[in-house]
Image (cartoon, rainbow, N blue to C red):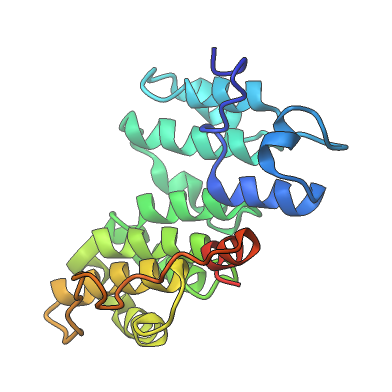
Amino acid sequence: ERLKLRDPGAIPEDEMWRWVRKEGKPLHDILLGRSDHQPDLQAAWRAADQVGRLDFAGALELLKSADPNERYWAVIALRSGGYEHGEQLAGYLDDISASVRIEVADWLAREKGSRKRALDRLTRELTHEDWWVALRACRAIELLGEDAREALPFMKKLYAKNRNRKGDGPFYLAFSSGAFLDGLGEKTEPWDFAPGAGAFTPEPKKKQDRDRARIGR
C-alpha cells in the first residue's frame, strides 16, 4: 500500500530536497516517474522495516549500501535495537549524506568516549546551508542537554542569528536552540504567541513566496 501511494515517508527530508533540486521537479512527480531519475522507494521502505527486527547482521550489511536512504535506516535499526558497538560507526560521521552523519553523531554523542568527535560533527552541521539539516543537528544537541555543554557557544551564535529573523527556518532554529539555552540556564528572549505578536511569519499570499519562506530563501 505504501508503494502504491508513493508514500515518501522512508526518505529523509534532506534526501527529498536533494532529489527535487537534482531533477527540477516536485517530489510527487519524481516518485511517479515523471523525471529522468527516481529514488528507489521500495528499497527505502525495505530498509525502514529493518527497525525493530534486531537483525544486526542485516543492518550492518545495509550500511555498505550506496543508497543513503538504506544507510540511514541501517543506523536507526542498530541504534534502536541496542547494538553495543556503535563506536564502530564513527567513520559514518563523515558520510556524504547529512541524515546519516547526524543520526550517527546523535547516537555517539550519548557516549563519553565518542562524545567530543560527535559534537564536533553536530556543531559543524549547525551552519549547513539548508536550515532543515541545521535543525536536525540543533534538535539533537537540544535533546542532549547538559551532555552537550561544549556546544553552548555554537548554539548561542545560532540563537542570536535567528531569534528575530523572519521565515520558518529561522523560527524553528531559534526555538530549538533557545530551548537548549534555557535548559542550561542561559538568558533568552521570551516567545509571545498571542495573535498579532509577530512570533510567527504571516503566510505569504503567492505560492512562490510561500515556498521561499518555507525553505528560508
The quarter of the image holding the N terminus is: top right
Q: Residue furthest right?
A: 36
Q: Quadrant of residue 31?
A: top right
- Number of marks in the image? 0
Query: Depth check: 176 or 50 in front?
Result: 176
Query: Depth check: 184 or 63 in front?
Result: 184
Identify the residue shown where x is 45% and y is 49%: 103
The quarter of the image holding the C terminus is: bottom right
Q: Quadrant of residue 16?
A: top right
Identify the residue shown where x is 60% and y is 67%: 209
Q: Residue furthest top?
A: 1
Q: Is residue 196 above or below residue 99?
A: below
Indicate the position of residue 83 as horizontal and vertical percent values: 36, 33
Residue 71 visible in the displayed image: yes
Query: Depth check: 146 or 183 in front?
Result: 183
Indicate the position of residue 133 as horizontal and vertical percent values: 51, 60
Q: Is residue 158 above or below residue 94?
A: below
Indicate the position of residue 39 as horizontal and vertical percent values: 72, 34
Indicate the position of residue 24 as horizontal and vertical percent values: 80, 51
Is residue 69 toward the left or the right of residue 188 in the image? right
Q: Is residue 194 above or below residue 132?
A: below
Query: Depth check: 131 or 201 in front?
Result: 201
Residue 39 visible in the displayed image: no
Q: Residue furthest left?
A: 185
Identify the residue shown where x is 59% and y is 29%: 62
Identify the residue shown where x is 16% and y is 75%: 182
